[in-house]
Amino acid sequence: MPSGRYRAFGFIAAALLFLPHLAFAASALDTANQQARELIRKTMADRRIPGLQVAIVKDGKVVLSESYGLANVENRVAVTDATLFPINSGTKSFTGVAAMQLVQDGRLDLAAPISRYLDDLPEAWRQVRVRQLLAHTSGLPDIVDAQGLVGGGSETQAWATVKALPMQAAIGERFTYNQLNYALLARIIAKQSQMPYERYLAQRQFAPVGMRSSTFGDSYDLIANAATMYSYFPRKTDAAGDAERLSHWFYDMPQGLWAGGGIQTTANELAAWILALSDGKLLGADGVRQMWTAEKLNSGADGSWGAGWPVLASAPQRQVAGIGGARAAFVVYPDERLAVVVLTNLVGANPERFIPQIAALYRPATEPGRDAAK
């Protein structure tokens, strides 16, 4: 048997052999971070994005977290890591987690008809399954149209109006994105948890993760540290041919629709939430897997969403996302232990379109799909 001195020499030699690998990994990460910074600056310039936060999760930790530009252009207020951005429909991913937590707790059955949990439903709605609300395959009419709440009145009036509308499709027949699905889910979550939807999220998701700044509201609410929203879209009073100009963007999110689009948060807090979800701190592995699996249509084909999450790819490597308001997105690549969060204050920035370029920087050069994502 080798002496202690020779065993020690062997350990040192092995460590020395391993050092170049560690140095390369650190160097590769530094290079990826610098390339990501350059890509973000260029993208902000090309897309004329006033303000942006980014957070990148790789191998169980946040490897890049930075803020750029202005949270409020007219007053020259810089974006910081404490600036709150609306994630709009990215909130649906949190609602998906809430539903799966209740499943895990034995208080919700995704295969059950929604009539098990809600009274006073139109007859045509009663056989919709909970999972079909989560995946937008319910076929229900929408409580929101191009002008906002259907009917143009209060939320109460909108509920009365939507209940009288015909179904958009047969239950389970096709994917149809729909805010009513999540308004109903908010009611189910509140009933089964015995607390308002927003309190449930605060207690079961925000608090365990340390999301101390995250809250609910819209651009009409007075929220400290909230970024101002902008767009280059023409105003209704603009004449044809008027030059584009940066203008305020106002959006209204009634409390009854918060489950579909009400969260305001930061990139850092979203990254912490993604890490907690990936580490099993919010939901068991089976629940996460089910949540990130596309719902089947009646035909047997995959729909576009799982439970609250758009499923961008199922193979060869999974990609799931939260996308909201044409200004915020987070994409999770669970098989690669990678996630990218980008929040902006420009409607039309569509960060889901350039997140794949950022993600590609954090993959080995020989990994399949790297070049295709550029």
Image (cartoon, helix red, strand yellow):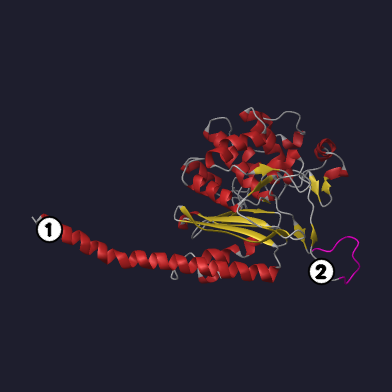
Q: CA distance from mark 2 to mark 1?
A: 75 Å
- Camera-side residue of 69 and 64: 69
Q: Amino acid at mark 2?
A: Glu
Dot 1 falls on a residue whose secondary structure is helix
Q: Residue at 69% across / 31% down in the picture? A: 115
Horizontal side of 142 relative to 23 (left or right) equals right
Residue 234 within the segment the image draws in magenta: yes
Q: Which residue is mark 1?
A: 5
Which residue range is magenta in the image?
233-242
Q: Give the answer, above or below, for where 303 lies relative to 346.
A: above
Q: Which residue is mark 2?
A: 244
Circle 2 crowding by C-alpha within 10 Å: few under 14, some 14–19, many from 20: few
Q: Amino acid at mark 1?
A: Arg
Horizontal side of 250 relative to 264 (left or right) equals right
Q: Residue at 70% across / 46% down in the picture? A: 224
- Camera-side residue of 66 and 295: 66
Dot 2 falls on a residue whose secondary structure is loop
- Camera-side residue of 128 and 263: 263
- Camera-side residue of 120 and 20: 20
Q: Is any part of residue 135 visible from this angle?
A: no
Q: Give the answer, above or below, for where 191 lies relative to 341.
A: above
* x then y, percent, for residue 374: 56, 70
Residue 3: quarter of image? bottom left
* x then y, percent, for residue 327: 69, 58
Horizontal side of 270 relative to 46 (left or right) equals left
Q: Give the answer, above or below, for where 359 lies relative to 92.
A: below
Circle 1 crowding by C-alpha within 10 Å: few under 14, some 14–19, many from 20: few
Q: Is any part of residue 262 visible from this angle?
A: yes
* x then y, percent, for residue 12: 21, 61
Foreground tag (2 vs 1): 1
